[in-house]
Image (cartoon, coloured by chain):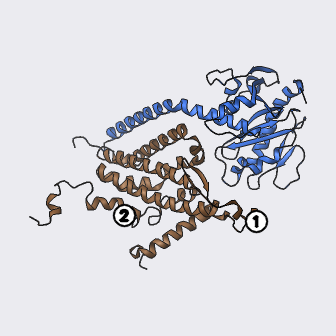
Chain colours: A brown, B blue
Amino acid sequence: MSTDTATAVAPKKESLFSKKNRRLLTDPLDDSNPITVQVLGICSALAITVQVQQAVIMSLAVLFVMIGGNVIISLMRNIIPDRIRIIVQLVVIASLVIIVDEVLKAYSPDISEKLSVFVGLIITNCIIMGRLEAFALGNKPGPSMLDAIGNAMGYAWILLAVALVREVFGSGAISFPGMGQVKFLPESWFMANGGFYENNNLMILPPMALVTVGVIIWIQRARNRSLIEEN
Amino acid sequence: MAFNKNSNGYTFLFAIVMVVLVGAILASLSLSLKPQQKANQAEKKMMNILGAIGVPSERGAVKPIFAEYVTARVSIDSEGRQVNSISGEVDPSNATDPFNIDVQKDYRSKAPASELNFPLFTCKKDGQDLYVVPVVGKGLWGPIWGYVALESDMETIYGAVFDHKTETPGLGAEIKEGFFQAPFKGKKINNVAPHFAVVKGGAPTTDYSVDGITGGTITSKGVGEMVDRTMGIYLKYFQSAPKAQK
């Protein structure tokens, strides 16, 4: 018997929050971040990061679809015929996305209008398909859920970081669902009113999202040397 | 496992059960959320009509403002004869209420104009009679629509709002922005065809046309086309209607 008390009290069955499972949550935040390391889901990261508000809603929608998809596929992993597994995954994702879309239309029409086509695009978000195929098909629902949360969070924090930079410098404001857009710079600072400040319009355009993501990747690799490929 | 999950029979069975199940779930969800979604759409429509006459409004507080400014909801047939006129509270279940005419559905149905009714909203703002005409048409990727308000002379445009479903962001999608909509104010509807046009960006405009969006040519043309086509129908009504207090 080990003298280590931690292993002595650990149940025989692997705990949901074992070290290995905790890594499912934390890895996607940094080491295997879906956007900055795997470079998946870039399209939505570029498209809807003009305002923090939209990024928050998109992140929540992806979180919901990702958890739902991962758990459902994981539960069905033993009965899904191999030959149609991709189609099954698509049907599950598409249904969840339609549910999100319908609920938004009914209870949050303004945000539904703003997201418009991007909600539908969750279906093609490669992160979700990737996790279903790579993880949920081969693992139990518990770890699959953690994996989903981890990856959705890894996606979300990049989205929010990019949106924050773009909104602050592009619109001189911060928005949050339910609060609207708050302009925190005094009006007299702006050049139109004789001041010295001007919003950077380039920030609102899609190219700056790419540059911002690039800067985040740069910072991340400078801090985490293990991510740098050897030549 | 007892069964072979890769046999053809099982694969078919799985697919059929899955499709039926998912279909049932989505259909029931859609049905249960429909009333709420319809109410949101009606609210948005009221906001758009008010927007065309330059009255700001917000979700949740539209109905009283709508009732204050919109005096009557009229429907006309393709020959310009008045079919119906209703005032008072909007009743979403009343099919004869011109507010409930779905102009987009009518446009898509490709039914001959003679079988359709066209809604018109008469409003009163600052003592002036205004007429709001809904317009629908095609953009580059999908439907575009809007509301054009005419002054009491039934000729001069008082204001216009446009919206779209899937036009290109930054190009065609700009039709919903103020800089595109503002020049409509003060323009006129021509009595003879073409009644109105959106011309190529930078080209000289007349009383009966406005500047289009550079890079959004097809969407701009769609806006011109829908205003022109719709006004052709409403002109018959305006010409026969008594030009009241000018």
Q: Quadrant of the C terminus of chain B?
A: top right
Residue identifier under label 1: A194
Q: Are marks 1 and 2 on the same chain?
A: yes
Residue B234 placement: quadrant? top right
C-alpha gap between disc 1 and disc 2: 49 Å
Amino acid type of the residue tagged 2 in the rendering = Asp
Q: Chain of mark 1?
A: A
Chain letter behind tag 2: A
Write down the residue under mark 2. A27
Residue A18 image offset from top left, x and y in percent:
25, 59
Rendered position, A17 above or below A227: above
Circles 1 and 2: CB atoms closer than 8 Å? no
Q: Say what secondary structure mark 2 lies in.
A: helix
Image location (x, y in percent) of residue B24 = 43, 32
Precedes in sequence: disc 1 or disc 2: 2
- Residue B170, image x and y in percent? 68, 55
Residue drawn at point x = 83 percent, y = 32 percent: B127
Q: Residues within 10 Å of mark 2 (few under 14, many from 20)?
A: some
Q: Is residue B8 above or below residue B241?
A: below
